[in-house]
Structures are given as C-alpha cells and as structure tokens.
Image (cartoon, helix red, strand yellow):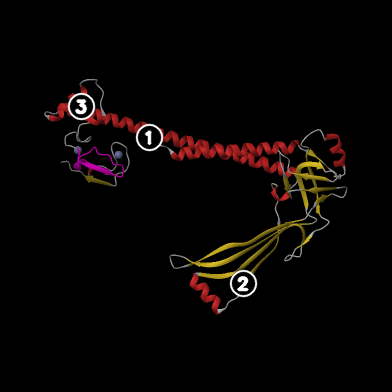
Amino acid sequence: MVPWGGITCCFSAAALYLLGRSSGRDAEVLKSVTRVNQLKELAQLLDTASKVLPFVVTISGRVGSETPINCEYSGLRGVIVEETAEQHFLKHSDTGSWIQDSAMMLSMCKEVPWYLDDGTGRVFVIGARNATGLALTVGSEVFEESGRSLVRGTLDYLQGLKMLGVKRIERVLPTGTPLTVVGEVVKDDIGTIRIQRPYKGPFYVSHKTIDQLIANLGKWARWYKYASLGLTVFGVYLIAKNAFQYFMERRRHWELRKRVFAAAAKRPGQDNEVAKAEDGSDGTQKEGLMPDICVICLEQEYNSVFVPCGHMCCCMSCSSHLTNCPLCRRQIEQAVRTFRH
Ligand SMILES: [Zn+2]
Ligand SMILES: [Zn+2]
C-alpha cells in the first residue's frame, strides 16, 4: 500500500520550505536596497548611480495628486478608487430551503497620476495596483435593498430566486496617506522622476515602513521553516510506520506459510502432493501453490473470507474466534463463508 498521507506531508513540507526560502530572500533583498531619506536627494542619487541598473530604492511620503478623484459615496478624495457592486439574493435549493448567495454585478477601478511627497520633493508612482502590499481603505459600504412589488416578487418566486439587494463597496487610496514604496526609480525625458516595478526585483507599495516589511518577511520565513520541519518529521514518521507495518505483514505471512506447509507435509493424501510439488524442484515456495489449510487449526480447509481486508486463510469455525485477520491484523467486520465447486 502506498503511504499517501506521508507523501502528501513531505510534498507540503517542500512547498512550505520553498515559500520560506523565497520570503527570506525577499527580506535580504529589501535589506540591501538603497534607502532614500529625503526625496530631493533622489535626483542627485540618480545621476551618480545611473550605471547601476535597475536602481532599486525605498522611499516614503504622502500620497498626492494634481487631479484627485472625488469619491461618489464616501466623499473621500483619492488617487485610486475601486468600486464593486454585488447582487445578494436567496436561491431555492434542491432540498427545498432558501440559501443566500451573491453575484458580482460591477467591478471597476479608476486611477489618476499620483505621486509621493515628503515636503522636499515628489516622485510619481506607476503601476501601484499590481504591487505587493497595497491595501485600499474601505471608503463606504452600503446595502441598497431591492424594492418589493407584487409582479417582481412573483417573477422572482417563479425563477426560484428572491432578490435581497445590492451591496456597493468603495475602496480608496486617499490623498495624504503615508506610504512606503520599494521599486526602480527612473527619470523620463522631461526630467520627471518616477518609481515603478523593476524588470526583476521587489515592488512594494505599503502602509508599513521598510523595517516593518523586513521584519514581517523574516517572521514569515521563520514560520514557514518551522512548519516545513514539523511536516517533514510527521511525513517521515507516517512513511516509516507504513514501511514497518508492511515488513511485519510480510513476516507474518511468511511464518504462517511455513506452518501451513509443514502441516500439509504431514498430512496423508492429496495435500501431500502439493507439499511435495512445492518442496521439490527448486525449493522455493510459489505463491499459487499454498495448500488450502486453515492457518489457525492447520487441519480444516479454509472456507471463509474476511471483510474488509479480503484475506482467505481460515476455516469458518476458527474465524468465529478471531477479531483481527491473522495475515494483516486488520479488524474483521464480517467473515463470509465461501464455497468451491
Ligand atoms: Zn481452522
Ligand atoms: Zn487480512
């Protein structure tokens, strides 16, 4: 039998190990990026370090924009606004009860050009929505109940649906939010400095400071490592247990066969021939030639099969005294009588 439990544990452990290693590596990369304390230094740094490509830095400042979006529902001013609307309804299930469900009706996102400002300079942030760590603030969450009318209600009922209402959520990146961005800085043709996803390397837009980001990644790396170690130990234990059980079963099997063959050899008549045939030519015991004797009493022919393991090795009268199969030690739920023609 293949020890699937153990193998699954070991594969999960390997996946966690890789995750941990990648988190640890990210933490190391974040430690090594250039920290820019004041945004006004960035232009100068770019000129001196422009030979290092990509030039990955970490900057912080407050979100700002020349053309911020005024949010419809929350009244906030933001630079990224995400709006979703979900239809909530009750659905008639096969069992006759009503279960609540929802479906996305609308999901849209608006973004205007925006920058980080720390009072000394500005850096435009490009492609922040695809960065790691960006969490938008929930500006408003409203539930608009469906209007009830007789016609609508009847139609809904015929379709097996009852409309409850629409939930509208507005998520915003408000202006003035303090953010840390890790990415590649570049200067475009007209001299504007912007920060974007490096071709290869980290791209973070986060409310956390760079030190908090590093500490977080380190924490996850350690957690993944311990979990991976624990799963490995458990997986190896399961595999070893399985191998031991397999070995013990083979041994029991072999001992029982020996006993059965010895008993068969002493018996007069036809069984003797089987024993001779088996002991004769090359001395090996062939699987198909096992005498039909009960492994317990060594006298009667076996005539029962155990459920659920399926082994046939005992007579009906010996079976009635057994709780576990003598070959595999699995519990016997039932012993069924067998007949031969
Ligand atoms: Zn018996
Ligand atoms: Zn069995």
Q: Label 2 amino acid?
A: Glu
Residue visible at 42% across and 37% down?
A: 3
Q: Label 3 amino acid?
A: Ala
**Label 3 vs label 1: CA separation?**
26 Å
Q: Position of residue 290 (x, y in %)?
A: 22, 31
**Label 3 vs label 2: CA separation?**
84 Å
Q: Position of residue 242 (x, y in %)?
A: 41, 35
Q: Secondary structure at mark 1?
A: helix
Q: Secondary structure at mark 2?
A: strand
Q: Secondary structure at mark 3?
A: helix
Q: Residues within 10 Å of mark 1 (few under 14, many from 20)?
A: some
Q: Earlier in the sequence, mark 3 or mark 1?
A: 1
Q: Position of residue 332 (x, y in %)?
A: 29, 44
Q: Earlier in the sequence, mark 2 or mark 1?
A: 2
Quadrant hosting ligand 2: top left
Q: Earlier in the sequence, mark 3 or mark 2?
A: 2
Q: Label 1 amino acid?
A: Gln
Q: Please identify the quadrant where the N terminus is shown.
A: top left
**Disc marking residue 262:** 3
Q: Which residue is mark 1?
A: 245
Is 214 placed left or right of 266 in the picture? right
Identify the image quadrant of residue 306. top left
The outermost residue toward the bottom is 150
Residue visible at 15% across and 30% down?
A: 271
Q: Which residue is mark 2?
A: 145
Front residue of 95 and 55 = 55
Q: Which residues are magenta?
A: 302-318
